[in-house]
């Protein structure tokens, strides 16, 4: 066998070894998980939780005491921000007074539900349902992101985005059923169109607080 033939065979063997080394990380076939989006691979679980707050009544006037009134304001703030559905009031004869205070604090009257019984004398309970978003745990770093030959997404891809969404969403119930969009302002649309036809600017004027300037002091020693 000539030297040229042996050299060519050696090159062929090295090439085969290199190709086989590169192919060790390539799967025979991609599984169905490769077609899943991050939202499907890392779903956010939304659970309904009952928030129940006990309040102490002032028996002399059949109403809340000052401490209960302050606590009711905090309850309403929590309900308007995180509550869903109706808010239930169980307070016996004091239910009408508490219901009136809820309405005065901003709770729509049609969302207040009076519940008979369920409390001991001198006590009241205000309850509502809130939703909690529970994201999937992240941290699967089993693959080396610096060396990939198959162009497949890493196992942790998209998990941080899902986790941040679950933590930052104002109302987790929107992840289950988004709120209905309100109709647009037709009068405002006509105003903008009329300005456009006349060649005027359609951008809203910014106030001094919206300028973004950190300081009004001139630079350059002036």
Image: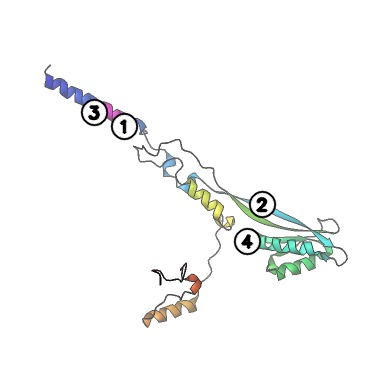
Span shown in magenta: 17-21
User: Which residue in the rendered view is the most extreme toward the front?
Assistant: 221
The mark nearer the N terminus, 1 or 2, is 1
Coloring scheme used: rainbow
Residues at discs 2 and 3 in contact (Cβ within 8 Å): no
Q: Helix, strand, or loop for circle 3?
A: helix
> Mark 4 highlights which residue?
81
| Residue for point 24% across, 25% down | 14
Q: Which residue is mark 2?
A: 49
Mark number displayed over residue 22: 1
- Residue at mark 2 to residue at mark 4: CA–CA distance: 15 Å
Disc 4 from disc 1: Cα separation: 55 Å
**Residue closer to the observer: 14 or 181:** 14
Q: Is residue 58 magenta?
A: no
Q: For the residues marked 3 and 4, what is the alpha-carbon distance in whole angstroms?
A: 65 Å
Helix, strand or loop for disc 4: helix
Label 1 neighbourhood size at 10 Å, few (<14), some (14-19), many (20+)? few
Foreground tag (2 vs 3) = 3
Task: Inspect the magenta stretch and tell me whether residue 20 lies in it.
Answer: yes
Residue at the disc numbered 3: 15
Q: CA distance from mark 3 to mark 1?
A: 11 Å
Q: Position of residue 177 (x, y in %)?
A: 56, 57
Circles 4, 1 touching at the beta carbon (< 8 Å): no
Viewer-side residue, 66 vs 35 = 66
90 lies above or below 109: above
Q: Earlier in the sequence, mark 3 or mark 1?
A: 3
Q: Earlier in the sequence, mark 4 or mark 1?
A: 1
Is 147 on the left-hand or right-hand side of 60? left
Q: Residues within 10 Å of mark 4 (few under 14, many from 20)?
A: few
Q: Quadrant of the N terminus?
A: top left
Residue farthest toward the right in the current orientation of the protein: 60
The picture places residue 58, in percent across and down from the top left corner, at 84, 63
């Amino acid at each position: 066998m000539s030297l040229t033939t042996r050299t060519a065979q050696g090159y062929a063997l090295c090439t085969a070894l290199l190709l086989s080394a590169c192919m060790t990380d390539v799967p025979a076939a991609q599984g169905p998980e490769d077609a899943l989006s991050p939202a499907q691979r890392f779903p956010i679980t939304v659970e309904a939780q009952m928030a129940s707050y006990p309040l102490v009544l002032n028996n002399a006037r059949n109403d809340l005491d000052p401490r209960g009134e302050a606590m009711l304001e905090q309850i309403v703030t929590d309900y308007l921000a995180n509550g869903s559905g109706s808010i239930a009031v169980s307070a016996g004869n004091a239910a009408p007074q508490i219901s009136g205070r809820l309405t005065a604090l901003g709770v729509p009257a049609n969302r207040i539900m009076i519940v008979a019984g369920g409390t001991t004398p001198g006590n009241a309970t205000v309850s509502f349902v809130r939703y909690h978003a529970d994201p999937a745990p992240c941290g699967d770093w089993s693959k080396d992101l610096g060396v990939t030959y198959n162009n497949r997404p890493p196992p942790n891809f998209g998990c941080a985005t899902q986790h941040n969404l679950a933590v930052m969403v104002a109302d987790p119930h929107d992840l289950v059923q988004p709120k209905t969009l309100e109709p647009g302002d037709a009068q405002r649309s006509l105003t903008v169109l009329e300005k456009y036809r006349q060649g005027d600017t359609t951008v809203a004027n910014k106030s001094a607080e919206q300028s973004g300037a950190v300081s009004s002091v001139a630079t350059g020693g002036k």
